Structures are given as structure tokens and as C-alpha cells.
Amino acid sequence: MKIRKIGGLIFVVFLFLLNSVNVNAYEDNSKEENAISKEIFESISLDEMEDSLEESSQEKIPFSVKEYVQNVCKGNCDLSLDSILEYLKRGISNQWETNKTLVVRLFAYAVLSGIFLNLSGSLYGKQLEENGFYLLYFLVVTILVSGFYAVFYVAEEVLGQVLSFMKTLVPAFSLALTWSSGSVTSVAFYEATLATIGVAENILYSFFLPIIQIYFLLRVMNPLSGGKFDKFASLLESIVRGGTKIILGIMLGHQGIKGLLMPALDQVKRNAVFRAAESIPGIGNVMNGVTDTIVGSGILIKSAIGVGGILAIAILCLLPLLKLGMFALMYRIMAAFSQPVADRRMVAIFQGSADSGKLLFQLVFMVAILFLLTLTIVIAATN
């Protein structure tokens, strides 16, 4: 009986010692992983990216990529949604306060143009109607041009912000890809993304934005010309709508092909190195464990930087997209409500402004989607 008790006691002590060894080994491994993650994180500079976010926007966005990556490395992936919602709410409120007076004035001018239209029964009334329309036309166009160029500046600014941010994100993300996947994938992503930035800067930003300006002016002047600019304006609209979709498809297809091939090539090279290291007597298992830790930490930091970049671009573009959407929606509603009582030429001006705002919205949206999907493809392909 005593022998059984002694044997049971020895077994309990053995389990306790074994558990202590496992806990100590786990703590040692955890410390080693944290040290390696810290070394990898410190080797990647995110300061330039932070400076780009702070300098590019007049109103500082409530998000920091560097802080997000640090929190992810500590196991915390939560976002401060309250501050983001407050940021959006404040921006939308400011936009409405700026435009509500103009909307009321424009609707009053539209109704007044309808009154002049109803006075065209006599020769004197016809002259009064034409003179009244031209007077109201120049008043309305002055307001519309001011409103359009305000949102045009919003679109121009946010496109410049996204391009500037991507130029600072690419070097940091490429370095993180070197740790997680390999140099081939890193160089391929660097080259492909720089090509995407070049296309966005030279075509979407420098070419399509001026086309939308010309399109707006044509739609505004069209009522005075008797509809002579209809076809040309339609051509410009087709160029912007079709061109953005074609560029999006080509760039994403190019990124997708590289995302399928380059990580596989790096994986083959890495496996060959790992097998050679494992064959070394005595240190093979140690080398295998260290390399697995390095790759795992690199994947975590790479994913954190990529997701942080996705969130930063989304937050950068969300408020401008809401402003552009409000502009297009307001003038579309104004055209719909003023059609029964206003001169058809006045309604055409409102509709042209709404369509111009819609083109600006599509351009900004396509640029945002282009870079968001580029980062998403690379993150998914290199995991």
C-alpha cells in the first residue's frame, strides 16, 4: 500500500516537473518570437508613411499605420470606429452646411426660369423669356462652376494623397515581403506597384481629371449652343467610364499573374535552403526552428503593414467619396424636382453637373479599388 502511495506521489511530481519544463520552454519560445518580431519591425521604417498621411490631408485622419502594426504585433487588431465615424460625420455635416444655401438659391432660380417660360405667349413675352433665361443662366452657371470646382479640388486632392501614400507604402511593404516571402516576390511587387502608380498618376490623374473638367464645361454650355456639344460630351464620358474599367482590369490582371507565380518561385528556393540546413548534423533542427520563426514573424508584420495600408487608403477616400456622392445626388434631385416647373435648359444644366460629379466619383472610386485590390492580392498570395 505504501509502495503505491509513493509511486503515485512520484508520478505527480514528475507531471509537475514536466509541466514546468513545458511552460518554461513555451515562455522561452514566446520571448524568442517577440524578439525576432521586434527586430524585423525595427528594420522597416514606417515614419515616412506616417508623415505622408499627416501632411497630405488638411484634416488629419484618425488612423496611424505604425500604431496599427504595433498593436497587431501585440495581438490587438481592434480599430477605433468611434473616432472614424465622428470624422466622417463632421465632414458630411460641413459639406451640407456649405451647400444647403446654394441648393435653395438654385431651386428658386429654376422656378423663376419656369415663370419666364410661361410669359412667352406674346412677342414681348418671348423677348422677356429669353432675356430672363440668359440672366438666370449666368447666375446659375456662376454657382454651379463654384460648386463643381470645390468638389473637383476634393477629387484632385484625394487622388494626390493616395498616390503620395502609395509611394511611401511600397518600399516598406516590399521590405516586409523580403522577410516573409523572398526577394523575387518583393522585387516583383515593387516593380508592378510602381507601374500601377505610374499609370494612375499619368492617365487617371493627369489625363482623366482634365477630361472631366472639359466635360462639365461642355454640359453647362450645351443649352446655349442648341445641343451642338451632345456627341462630344458623350464621347468624353465614354472615355472616362470605359478607360477606368479597362485600366483597372489590366492592372489587376498583371498583379494577379505575378501574385500566382513569384511566391511559388520563392517557396521553391526557400525549401531548397531549408533542406540543406536541416541536413547539417547537430544544428539542423535549430536552424529549422529559427527560420520558421523568422518567416512567421515576417508574414505577421507584412500582413499588418498591408492591412494597415488598406485601412489608410479606405479612410482617406471614404469622406471625399461621400462628398462627391452628395454633390451628384443633390443636383440629380434638383433636376428631378425642378423639371415640372423649370425651363428644360435649366434642368439640363443641373443634370450635367450631376453627371460630372458622378464621373469624379467613379474616378476616385476606381483609383481606390485599384490600390486596395492590389494590396489584397499580394497579401493573400504571399500568405
Image: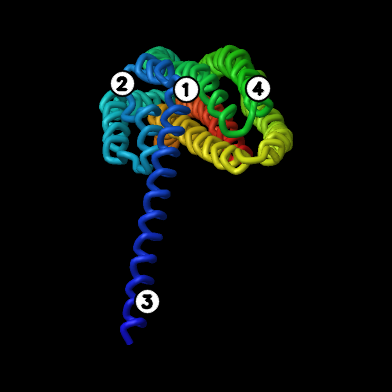
Disc 1 to disc 2, how far (Cα)? 27 Å
The residue where tag 2 is placed is 59
Which amino acid lies under the numbered mark 2 shown in the image of this protein? Glu
Of pointers 3 and 2, the one earlier in the residue sequence:
3
Disc 3 to disc 2, how far (Cα)? 72 Å
* Residue 218, numbered circle: none
How many numbered marks does the figure carry?
4
Disc 4 to disc 2, how far (Cα)? 34 Å
Of pointers 3 and 1, the one earlier in the residue sequence:
3
x and y percentages locating residue 22 in the rendered image: 41, 55
Single out the mark in the foreground, 3 or 2: 3
Q: Is residue 174 above or below residue 311?
A: above
The residue where tag 1 is placed is 44
Q: Where, quadrant-wise, is the N terminus in this rendering?
A: bottom left
Q: Residues within 10 Å of mark 1 (few under 14, many from 20)?
A: some
Q: Is residue 8 above or below residue 208?
A: below
Residue 350 placement: quadrant? top left
* Residue 187, numbered circle: 4
Of pointers 3 and 4, the one earlier in the residue sequence:
3
Residue, x 33% and y 17% (percent of image)?
58
Task: Say which element carries label 1.
Answer: loop
x and y percentages locating residue 155 in the rendered image: 46, 21
**Callout 4–callout 2 Cβ contact below 8 Å:** no
x and y percentages locating residue 232 in the rendered image: 66, 18
Task: Say which element carries label 3.
Answer: helix
Of pointers 1 and 2, the one earlier in the residue sequence:
1
Residue 235 placement: quadrant? top right
